[in-house]
Image: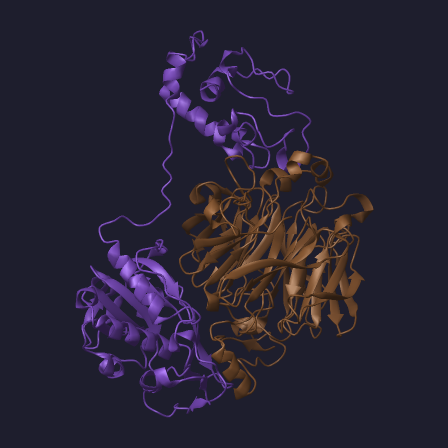
Chain colours: A purple, B brown
C-alpha cells in the first residue's frame, strides 16, 4: 500500500499546505513517499529508536547564538536576542514558498509536533519559544509570515514567524549561523523564487548558546523534546563544558624545604628561585614549541606521571619519529646536578630551575 | 555531473520498501563519507590528496594536492593545485564539513588541523584556518585522525594523549566555525565489555568513526598511540613491548548522547569502519591490521549489536597489513588494500557473514588508501601509510593512480609519481566537483535533484 502526496506547487503557501497535509496523514502513512519518488525524512515518521531520557546526557555548548534585527508578524522591529532571552528557543530558517518536502516544511512540521507534545505540559511550554525566520525577505513580508503561521498559533508554546527588512538584514544572521543558502536562477539568469539550502534547526538555551543543530536526517520531535527538557532540567547549573582543573604542585616549597631529608638545593646567589621562575619552568617543560618542529616538549619523553621517564618505550622516539638509541633518563633530583649532562656535551645549562620542576 | 541529496530514485516499490525499513535519513556519499552532506553520484572533477612533505623533496612541506580526474578536462590526469601548509605535521586524514564547503585535514604529529575552503574554487583549495591548540582545548588529546561531519559540527577521533603518548585517547567535537565543543574519552569501563567485566580488553584506544543514524549508532575503532605511529616501523616490529600497544577494540556509542554503550573485542588493530548503505543492512565492516581479518559489526535479531570475524585477508600469518577498505554503494563489494604486498583485493560481501575474495591486483610496491566513485567504476589509490612506516629505498613508491573497474578487471588510466613531481608522500583522498557549488566550470549539465 502506498500513499503518494500530490504536487502542490501552485498553491499560494505550499509549505504550510504541505505541513498541514502531512500532519493530518502522519499517523496513517505506512510508506511515506512523495509523488516524485522522494522518501520523506525521519521527522515525518515514528522514531526508529527510543529517544534518550531527558537529563541523562549533556548537550555541549556549540557557540553563541547570534543576535540580529528582525520583524515580527506585526511588522515590529525586534531583536533575536530579546526573543530568545530567558527561554529555550528552537530557531528554524525557512522561506514560505519552499516546496522541498524534506526542507522547510519538515522543520515546520516537527516544530508543530513539539508544540503539540508540550500542550500537556504547560509549565514546560511556557519556557519554550519557537522561532521561524524567513531568509527570503523580498517575498516573505510580515503579512506573508503571519499568514504562513496563522494555523500554528495558540496552545501554550509561543511561536513567532519572523522576517527581516531586507536581504542586508538577513545576510549577517544566516552567515553567523552558517545556514548555507543560494538563490536558484534559470537559464536566463532570472531568480526562480527558490533557494538551494541545507536545512538547519538550532536548539538555543536560555543564555543564548547553541546547544544542538539538526538537519534533515536528524530532525525529529522525540529527540528534540528530549533535548529541550534536558536543557530545562539543567537550569541553574553551569554549561556543560570541558573544564580541566589543573592540580599544580607547590614546587617552590620543595625547593625551600627539600623533602625526605635531602640536602638544600644549590641555588646561585645571582639567580634565586622564585615563584615566577618555577611557573616559567613548568611552562617551558610542557612547551612543544621549543623543539625543532614545534612538536615535542620535555614532558613527552620525561613523563611526570611516570617518574619523569617513559614506561612505554625502551628507547625514546625523537623528533619526527627519528630513532633515539637510549631511554629517557628519569629527572628526579637533577636539581642537584651542577650541569645537565647530555649528548650535547658542553652546553652549560644550569640545571637548577629544571630541577625545581622535575625534582618535585 | 549528478548531485544527489536526500532523494532516492527508482520505483515507488523500491522506495516504499526502503522507507518501510527506515532508510529515510540515510544518505550516501562516495561510499565512505558522512551521510549528512551533498554527494557526487556522477563524474568527480578533482581529487584532493592530503600529502606528507618529505625531507629533501620540493618544499619539504605537507600539502593539499588537487588532481584533475575528469576525462573531459584538458588537464585530466594532471596536478592542478597544491597548497603547502608550512612544515611537516604527519599529514594523515581529511574530510568535509556537512555542507561540503570546507575540508578539514589533520597532522598526527603536530596536532594541527588545517581548514581549506574548497567551495570558492574547487580546483584551488585555500587554507583559511589553522587550529593549533587542539591538544590544550581537548584536554590532552593527541593525533587528530578521522574527521566526520555531523550537522554543524565535526567529530574528530584522536589516536593518542599528551600524558604518555600511548593509545588512550578520545573523540573530540568541534563546531564548523572551528571552535572546540566537547571531548569524549574512549571507554575503559570493564562493565561495558562484550562478555562481561571479568574480561580484560577495554583499552580506550581510538582510530576511525562512522555512524548509522537510523539506528542511533556510532562506532569507533582502535589503532595505536604517538609513540608507535611515530616510531620507525622495522624497529617497532622488533620491539615486543611496543607491539603490545595496539588497539583491540571497537566501541558502540549512542550517537545522540555520545555515550559509550558496549566495547567489542576485535584483536589486532581494527582500522577503517565502513557501514552498509541499504536500509535493511544494519551492519558495518572493519579490517584488522595485525591479524588480517574482515570483521562484521552487526545488529542481531534481538536488536543487540555484535562483532564477528567473517573472513581472512590474504594469508594472515604473512601479516599483509590490511589498511584501507572501501564499500560499494550497493553493499555488494568491498575493496581491501594490503600495504605490505601492495595489493588491492576485492571481496564479494553480498553475504555479509561470508565475504569471498573474487579478485586481486598489484597496485604498487606499497599501497595504502583506496577511494571509489559512487557508481564503483572509478577507483583511486595512494601509497603512503605513515612517514616512518613507508617502505625504504626503491620500494618507497609514492603515487596517485586512477583505475577503471569494468566489473572484471582494474585498468589503470593514469598515474602521478609524487616523488618525480616533488610533492611528497601521497596519503588520503577526497572528491570534489564544480557542480556541487553551482560552478559554471561544470562540464556536464548539473542534474541536481535538490
Residue A18 seen from this side: no
Residue B367's x, y, as percent? 73, 55
Q: Going 19% across and 76% down the picture, which residue do you hit?
A: A155
Tell me: residue A162, above or below residue A264: below
Residue A4's x, y, as percent? 44, 90
Q: Which of A186 and B339 is in front in this view?
A: B339
Residue B289 left/right relative to B413: left
Q: Going 54% across and 32% down the picture, which residue do you hit?
A: A300
Residue B186 left/right relative to B51: left
Image quarter in which the N terminus of chain B is found: bottom right
Tell me: residue A153, above or below residue A273: below
Q: What is the number of callouts on the image?
A: 0
Residue A85 seen from this side: yes
Tell me: residue B237, above or below residue B3: above
Q: Which of A233 and A206 is in front in this view?
A: A233
Residue A269's x, y, as percent? 42, 8
Q: Nearer the viewer, residue B113 or B281?
A: B281
Residue A324's x, y, as percent? 67, 29
Q: Nearer the viewer, residue B3 or B82?
A: B3
Q: Residue furthest right?
A: B394
Amino acid at each position: 500500500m502506498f500513499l503518494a502526496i500530490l504536487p502542490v506547487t501552485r498553491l499560494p503557501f505550499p509549505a504550510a499546505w504541505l505541513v498541514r497535509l502531512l500532519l493530518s496523514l502522519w499517523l496513517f502513512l505506512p510508506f511515506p513517499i512523495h509523488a516524485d519518488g522522494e522518501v520523506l525524512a525521519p521527522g515525518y515518521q515514528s522514531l526508529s529508536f527510543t529517544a534518550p531520557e531527558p537529563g541523562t546526557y549533556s548537550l555541549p555548548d556549540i557557540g553563541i547564538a547570534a543576535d540580529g534585527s528582525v520583524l515580527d508578524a506585526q511588522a515590529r522591529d525586534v531583536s533575536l536576542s530579546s526573543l530568545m532571552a530567558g527561554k529555550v528557543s528552537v530557531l528554524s530558517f525557512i522561506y514560505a514558498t519552499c516546496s522541498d518536502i524534506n526542507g522547510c516544511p519538515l522543520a515546520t512540521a516537527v516544530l508543530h509536533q513539539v508544540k503539540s507534545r508540550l500542550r500537556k505540559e504547560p509549565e514546560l511550554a511556557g519556557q519554550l519559544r519557537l522561532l521561524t525566520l524567513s531568509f527570503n525577505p523580498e517575498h516573505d513580508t510580515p503579512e506573508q509570515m503571519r499568514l504562513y503561521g496563522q494555523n500554528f498559533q495558540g496552545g501554550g508554546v509561543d511561536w513567532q514567524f519572523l522576517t527581516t527588512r531586507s536581504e542586508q538584514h538577513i545576510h549577517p544572521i544566516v552567515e553567523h549561523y552558517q545556514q548555507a543558502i543560494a538563490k536558484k536562477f534559470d537559464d536566463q539568469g532570472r531568480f526562480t523564487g527558490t533557494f538551494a539550502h541545507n536545512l538547519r534547526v538550532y536548539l538555543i538555551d536560555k543564555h543564548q548558546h547553541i546547544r544542538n543543530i539538526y538537519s534533515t536526517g536528524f530532525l525529529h520531535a522525540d529527540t528534540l523534546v528530549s533535548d529541550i527538557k534536558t536543557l530545562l532540567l539543567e537550569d541553574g547549573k553551569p554549561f556543560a563544558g570541558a573544564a580541566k582543573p589543573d592540580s599544580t604542585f607547590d614546587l617552590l616549597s620543595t625547593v625551600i624545604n627539600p623533602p625526605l631529608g635531602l640536602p638544600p638545593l644549590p641555588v646561585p646567589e645571582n639567580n634565586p628561585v622564585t615563584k615566577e621562575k618555577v611557573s616559567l619552568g613548568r611552562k617551558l617543560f610542557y612547551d612543544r614549541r621549543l623543539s625543532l618542529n614545534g612538536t615535542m616538549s620535555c614532558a613527552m619523553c620525561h613523563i611526570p606521571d611516570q617518574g619523569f621517564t617513559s614506561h612505554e618505550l625502551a628507547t625514546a622516539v625523537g623528533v619526527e619519529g627519528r630513532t633515539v638509541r637510549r631511554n629517557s633518563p628519569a629527572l628526579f633530583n637533577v636539581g642537584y646536578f651542577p650541569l645537565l649532562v647530555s649528548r650535547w656535551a658542553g652546553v652549560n645549562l644550569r640545571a637548577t630551575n629544571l630541577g625545581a620542576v622535575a625534582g618535585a | 555531473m549528478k548531485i544527489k541529496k536526500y532523494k532516492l530514485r527508482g520505483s515507488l516499490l523500491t522506495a516504499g520498501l526502503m522507507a518501510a525499513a527506515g532508510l529515510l535519513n540515510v544518505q550516501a556519499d562516495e561510499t565512505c563519507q558522512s551521510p549528512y552532506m551533498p554527494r557526487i553520484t556522477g563524474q568527480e572533477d578533482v581529487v584532493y590528496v592530503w600529502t606528507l612533505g618529505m625531507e629533501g623533496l620540493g618544499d619539504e612541506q605537507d600539502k593539499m594536492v588537487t588532481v584533475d580526474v575528469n576525462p573531459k578536462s584538458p588537464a585530466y590526469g594532471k596536478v592542478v593545485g597544491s597548497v603547502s601548509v608550512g612544515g611537516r605535521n604527519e599529514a594523515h586524514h581529511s574530510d568535509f564539513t556537512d555542507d561540503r564547503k570546507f575540508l578539514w585535514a589533520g597532522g598526527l604529529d603536530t596536532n594541527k588541523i588545517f581548514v581549506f575552503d574548497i567551495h570558492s574554487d574547487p580546483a584551488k583549495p585555500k587554507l583559511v584556518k589553522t587550529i593549533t591548540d587542539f591538544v590544550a582545548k581537548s584536554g590532552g588529546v593527541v593525533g587528530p585522525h578521522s574527521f566526520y561531519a555531523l550537522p554543524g559540527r565535526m567529530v574528530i577521533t584522536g589516536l593518542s594523549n599528551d600524558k604518555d603518548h600511548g593509545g588512550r585517547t578520545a573523540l573530540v567535537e568541534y563546531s564548523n566555525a572551528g571552535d572546540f565543543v566537547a571531548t569524549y574519552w574512549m571507554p575503559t569501563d570493564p562493565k561495558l565489555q562484550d562478555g562481561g567485566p571479568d574480561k580484560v580488553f577495554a583499552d580506550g584506544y581510538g582510530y576511525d568513526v562512522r555512524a548509522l543514524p537510523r539506528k542511533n549508532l556510532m562506532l569507533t575503532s582502535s589503532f595505536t598511540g604517538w609513540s608507535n605511529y611515530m616510531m620507525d616501523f622495522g624497529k617497532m616490529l622488533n620491539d615486543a613491548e611496543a607491539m603490545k600497544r595496539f588497539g583491540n577494540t571497537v566501541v558502540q556509542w549512542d550517537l545522540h548522547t555520545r555515550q559509550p554503550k558496549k566495547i567489542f573485542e576485535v584483536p589486532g588493530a581494527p582500522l577503517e569502519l565502513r557501514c552498509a548503505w541499504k536500509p535493511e543492512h544494519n551492519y558495518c565492516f572493519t579490517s584488522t591490521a595485525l591479524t588480517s581479518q574482515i570483521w562484521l559489526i552487526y545488529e542481531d535479531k534481538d536488536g543487540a549489536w555484535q562483532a564477528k570475524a567473517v573472513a581472512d585477508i590474504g594469508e594472515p600469518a604473512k601479516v599483509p597489513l590490511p589498511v584501507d577498505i572501501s564499500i560499494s554503494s550497493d553493499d555488494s563489494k568491498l575493496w581491501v588494500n594490503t600495504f605490505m604486498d601492495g595489493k588491492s583485493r576485492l571481496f564479494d560481501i553480498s553475504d555479509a557473514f561470508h565475504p569471498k575474495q573474487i579478485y586481486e591486483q598489484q597496485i604498487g610496491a606499497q599501497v595504502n588508501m583506496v577511494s571509489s566513485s559512487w557508481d564503483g567504476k572509478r577507483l583511486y589509490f595512494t601509497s603512503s601509510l605513515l612517514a616512518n612506516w613507508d617502505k625504504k629505498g626503491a620500494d618507497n613508491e609514492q603515487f596517485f593512480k586512477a583505475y577503471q573497474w569494468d566489473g572484471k578487471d582494474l585498468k589503470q588510466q593514469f598515474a602521478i609519481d609524487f616523488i618525480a613531481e616533488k610533492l611528497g608522500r601521497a596519503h588520503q583522498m577526497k572528491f570534489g566537483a564544480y557542480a556541487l557549488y553551482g560552478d559554471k566550470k561544470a562540464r556536464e549539465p548539473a542534474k541536481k535533484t535538490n
